[in-house]
Image (cartoon, coloured by chain):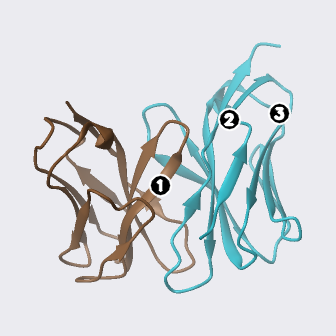
Amino acid sequence: EAAVTQSPRNKVTVTGGNVTLSCRQTNSHNYMYWYRQDTGHGLRLIHYSYGAGNLQIGDVPDGYKATRTTQEDFFLLLELASPSQTSLYFCASRDRGQAPLFGEGTRLSVL
Amino acid sequence: GEQVEQRPPHLSVREGDSAVITCTYTDPNSYYFFWYKQEPGASLQLLMKVFSSTEINEGQGFTVLLNKKDKRLSLNLTAAHPGDSAAYFCAVSGAGFASALTFGSGTKVIPCLP
């Protein structure tokens, strides 16, 4: 069964902390995406990737790095977390022309 | 880049009544259109995918209309029931190899007793 798995599901860190959010898909999809969801803004694209080693900048990339190590794994890195990055983060994978399949989300709080 | 405006942000609808959510987009080359449903505390669940060549699509309890001339996409909930209580998001992408989705800001639907 197609799946996108995110970890951790919840994370609390302090301002200036270092956070890595993980995403794994078992769908053999080429495209993977990181979005953040905030009230009143819908989902906003942070970074995305076409395949292992590829990285594309999304609409709200400031303060975030990402790395696609394999076709299955896509990581989002916050190296100096700030309270403005408190949000609900979704990872998604997609094949060309198909609807993205979303993970369950990671709720991040930066104190 | 693509911009998607979704209205209204909140929608109270009596059970059994219909309700319409509308998205307008800016890129005339947009090709794929999606509606997602998000129940409280849950992830996004695909309701419908719309191709640019199809104007009317029917699902279970809803209809999706695409007007490419006006660059407008709408979701019509045909007879609201408690299971419709959720946030709904439209999303738009181009046909190109590199196209990512641009989402609307969402509509929170709250069915209320008739």
The x and y percentages for residue B69 are 89, 71
Disc 1 marks a residue whose amino acid type is Arg
Which residue, given by chain and number where applicable, does mark 3 sit on? B79
Say what secondary structure mark 1 lies in: strand
Q: Tell me if residue A111 comes above or below residue A84 in the rendering.
A: above
Disc 3 marks a residue whose amino acid type is Ala
Residue at point 10% right, 49% down?
A18
**Distance between mark 2 and mark 1 Cα atoms:** 16 Å
The x and y percentages for residue A43 are 49, 51
Q: Quadrant of the N terminus of chain B?
A: bottom right
Which residue, given by chain and number where applicable, does mark 2 sit on? B9
2 or 3: tag closer to the N-terminus: 2
Residue at point 77% right, 30% down?
B80
Around disc 1, counting alpha carbons within 10 Å, would you say few (fewer than 14), some (14 to 19), or many (20 or more)?
many
Q: Colour of chain B?
A: cyan
Q: Is residue A104 visible?
A: no
Disc 2 marks a residue whose amino acid type is Pro
